Amino acid sequence: MTNKKSRTEENNFKVKFLPFETIVEVPPGTSLLDAVKTASLPLKTTCGGKGTCGDCVIQIIEGTYHSKPSAALSDKLASRGFSLACQTEVKDNITVQLPQFRELDIKSIVDSKFFKEQRDNISGVYELNPSVKKIELLLSPPTLEDNYSDLRRIERQLQKELALKKIDCEYSVLKKLAQTVRKNKGKISIFLSLSGKQATVIDVAPQSEGKKLYGIACDVGTTTVALHLVDLQNEKILATASSLNQQIACGEDIISRINFAQKPGRLKKLQELIILTLNNLIKKASKSAKVSISDIYLASVSGNTTMIHLLLNLEPRYIREEPYVPTFNQVPTILSRDLGLKMNNEGRIYCSPAVGSYVGGDITAGLLCTPILRDSKKVALFIDAGTNGELVVGNKEWLMTCACSAGPAFEGSGIKCGMPASEGAIEEIKMLDSGEFKYKVINGTKPQGLCGSGLVDLLAELFTFGYIDRHGKFNEKKAGKKIVKTEEGKGFLIEEGKNCYWGKDLIVTENDISNLIRTKAAVFSACSVLLKNVGLGFDKIDSVYIGGGFGQHLNINNTIRIGLLPDLKREKFHYLGNSSLLGAYLILLSDKNKDLANEIAEKMTYIELNTEPTYMNEFTGALFLPHTDIKLFPSVKQTLNL
Amino acid sequence: MTNKKSRTEENNFKVKFLPFETIVEVPPGTSLLDAVKTASLPLKTTCGGKGTCGDCVIQIIEGTYHSKPSAALSDKLASRGFSLACQTEVKDNITVQLPQFRELDIKSIVDSKFFKEQRDNISGVYELNPSVKKIELLLSPPTLEDNYSDLRRIERQLQKELALKKIDCEYSVLKKLAQTVRKNKGKISIFLSLSGKQATVIDVAPQSEGKKLYGIACDVGTTTVALHLVDLQNEKILATASSLNQQIACGEDIISRINFAQKPGRLKKLQELIILTLNNLIKKASKSAKVSISDIYLASVSGNTTMIHLLLNLEPRYIREEPYVPTFNQVPTILSRDLGLKMNNEGRIYCSPAVGSYVGGDITAGLLCTPILRDSKKVALFIDAGTNGELVVGNKEWLMTCACSAGPAFEGSGIKCGMPASEGAIEEIKMLDSGEFKYKVINGTKPQGLCGSGLVDLLAELFTFGYIDRHGKFNEKKAGKKIVKTEEGKGFLIEEGKNCYWGKDLIVTENDISNLIRTKAAVFSACSVLLKNVGLGFDKIDSVYIGGGFGQHLNINNTIRIGLLPDLKREKFHYLGNSSLLGAYLILLSDKNKDLANEIAEKMTYIELNTEPTYMNEFTGALFLPHTDIKLFPSVKQTLNL
């Protein structure tokens, strides 16, 4: 029995997938697409493995393989090792790159124009006072007259430096204490986790080892995950890393992930996938910043309530069952070793507090980056348009919030020509009077697709130039031969294959356009219902802050033109970018922000759209470009002569 | 390679040792004595495996074996499956009982006469207020109007019942929270670990599961380990279990254990052995009380500083190197899962606080059981004569302490006829005028050896009747044929083999007597030095409290006659028995006792005997029966006409 098994295993081949470093063993002749499925990795395919859509393109880095030729892949790409996963058989141990998982184009908001101007006005504080501290101590050598225990000698010194009520000590520290304090003539670095006047010693090292104190701020999104690696002794962001959330293979939105989790073992699987995603990012960031993973002592994570439940392996089903009760809103501090996160074993993990099942810690974190809580009179609107859309309206005195299932369209997911804001994504696009497009690609390569901001532009331009009508249907007469046939129905040619990275025509389908319209309608109608609930018209809004995964550049004019955002004076709008990530960073830097986030979470009143009778009407009204009720969009009406 | 290995393994036999349930695999023909060594289990042997001393007797419970006959084992015992381990070859998978590891005869001090009379006068408090509590909650069902998170609903209810400042929650609880609160219509049992106004939720279960709250109090001695299993809802002791400390195979005293730990892997091994010992006792106690191990949430452990270092896998070498600095005196709370102790995974472990390297938590715990700290004027002496001897003198105002290496002789270890106070041990022995002995055996069986109290009696009787002189040497003229030859030199016949359990003559050797005299001298001289240090004579002592592993009954007259204890009025003496265990029990019951123990530990002044110039003189003087200076023992002088 043993022999038989080992023979089978011997004949299997190992397939290693980059950038995940996941390895699976498969029998010879297995298609790479099946190997990807075995590895539970995400890879989109539209044609279902027939070799016609070309979506499942991968690049083979090492090892021999056999691929059937396909019209969906140019010879040039094929010669560079690109293949369609569905047309490739495993014949050897091979290493495969999944090109859809390029690093996202995330620049820290810390460096953004908005933040540079506003950093002294934001609701959070921008100060360095993290809850984990490194303290350098010099212990005097023990004598027969002064032979207190090692631990007491440390406590005595600590009390001199900090006024503490209680000092505790992790068991792992006790185990190495005797050796450590004797290594460098009593010169030691102590790592403390502080909570008020209480401290826990979480690590100790001889000063000669030169251990540092780092932290990570993470935004765990349904579609994308991003993190900053931060030096907690000087608040510097040393590295930024991001990728798709590997859970995407188990469903694109929150509801499908929750459904996926309902079979035995699947919840654990989802946890493993997000931990894998985070660990890959931590590894990447640490490597690039030349930081030892064991020097990372603190993590601040923000994400929607479902993502945090999945990260922590907590049953998510009651989030989607009425009355929508999550396990927690404020998560107790979690230990890195309980999750298997690549940090110091005694690392502490904070999760931003949630308001409820559908307004999560990404929103409370995001609010820290806005000036909303500074002002008692002016009214601000905060919109986070990620895979879910969450909205907050209010000021220092009151806050009202709601959520809608926007879907990941503006993160480039579920759209044929969509992609995350990574290298090769069109982030800005303009139609010339000639009907040709002029566009800007991230990193200046040949285009592979469009990210959120590009999709907003595309929709606005097609609408402006009359290539689609107010329902989002193609004007075939006008478009002529720009309308092409695709497996998913009619499409509009954006760029010819010869000019594109994959050698395939870049096309937006009518389905894609419907999808984008549904998404913008969900956000706008949520916005209307929220404001009606507080009895305010759009004109009473003094500022609008926009977060989300659109990419670096969002054209506000175009968001209004397609009816995603309300038609207000352009100077009222501030595009933040990934505010959830910046909020996590602020919480990482100072416990004051953690307390403030808790306060915000407590304060906010949540409106359940599912039980709002007017929501469905509002949504239906918003399924037009820009809206059924054109009076809501006077500037668009005027410009486009509607 | 794989095949070869599995063939070798197939031919090996499994030997299972009771009561430890340790299993080792050995090649056919291995002697059982070697198998015992492979298993790192303790089994004494004097002749070194020649089959003559009969010490290594074991009983084979199951499986076939081959034993050479030996004069050291009666046919009757052989017919009952008893064998000498050194003369037995493994020929089969067998199960072996190590008979030296019978349950100790530990009755709870709670039931002792002393404690019944004194329980309202002891320094500790005798109240039920443990730091882990079980709270029954009824959560109202969530609605759309009241859809707070599960955790918040619990916190809200808890705040109503207890006035808490902060409520934390273990990650393991979070993971099962959603399911648990929905199982029994919101009726849940919450298990809280409390520290002042702070609480941590460490477990949650539906009330229908009927989970209970139990704790264990443990005395981890160098030679013996004992524990009480306690119902923390009514303070009842449900079961008591005890055995030798399995570490004994690695050295009989503290110094030899510390030396043993100096090679790689050995410290871990020592930790494993004590955890194994404790886990066997917990299993046994839980089984007898029909208690689920997962219902044990709290452990209170007292032991000397070295034992606690070994239990926690902490480097012990600096305990024995000048200036004798331990890792800790007050140990932070340890989690059961970090140690692998058989309790609930979130179980909390307290260790009684130590004064220093040689006065440990067993002493601070022991003091809780005495009235010493109640009185500001009277002076009391506390003596714990275990493997180490520790002494405390003082009262409410001041406390002075010292320690001496007494050795485990009075725990029955290192003495040919000695044994722990378990079934078959002579606990009282008297010499008749005829020169015959009259004795009382624990559980009334045939005698196997003598425990501490029996050894004290034996020494006193031999001395009283003139069979040994003041140096402890035999009076051969008087003893005549009672003096027999043994492998270790001359011995005195206590009982003939036909009347003994093992069928072998029960003999005390001259070596044994020297050993006992050295032990009593160590204790008495420490006592003298301690008192001289505080400038008090013995006559200034108002009470003497004696703890230690002598067994249930200690004859105070005899302890004085041999010069172990000072010659004071008999009514001043109180024999406590295992005060360390009772102290651990008191700390388990109430946090107030933990605080008091910390206070005691802080307060005590430690005198290092190693640097006391007079100690060696005092020790030499005490190597006589009862003492070189007979004036110190006027009542003995008078009675024995010395």
Image: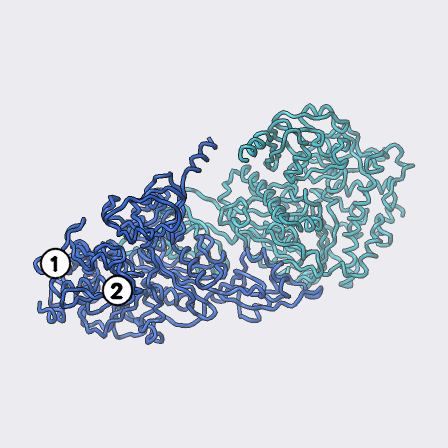
Chain colours: A cyan, B blue
Q: Secondary structure at mark 2?
A: strand
In the rendered structure, find residue B427 and report the number of the disc placed on it: 2
Instruction: Give percent across and percent down for residue B36.
Output: 34, 46
User: Mark 1: which amino acid?
Assistant: His
Q: Secondary structure at mark 1?
A: loop
| For residue A262, side relative to residue B285 (left or right) | right
**In this view of the protein, can residue B206 be seen by the observer?**
yes
Quadrant for residue B241, please give it: bottom left
User: Mark 2: which amino acid?
Assistant: Glu
Which residue is at the front of the view, B282 or B4?
B4
| Mark 2 and mark 1: Cα distance apart in space | 24 Å
Which residue is at the front of the view, A379 or B254?
B254
* Camera-side mark, 2 or 1: 2
Residue located 73% across and 23% down the image: A75
Q: Residues within 10 Å of mark 2 (few under 14, many from 20)?
A: many
Quadrant for residue A401, please give it: bottom right
| For residue B101, side relative to residue A577 (left or right) | left
- Asked if marks 2 and 1 fall on the same chain, the answer is yes
In the rendered structure, find residue B471 and report the number of the disc placed on it: 1
Instruction: Give percent across and percent down for residue A147.
Output: 30, 55
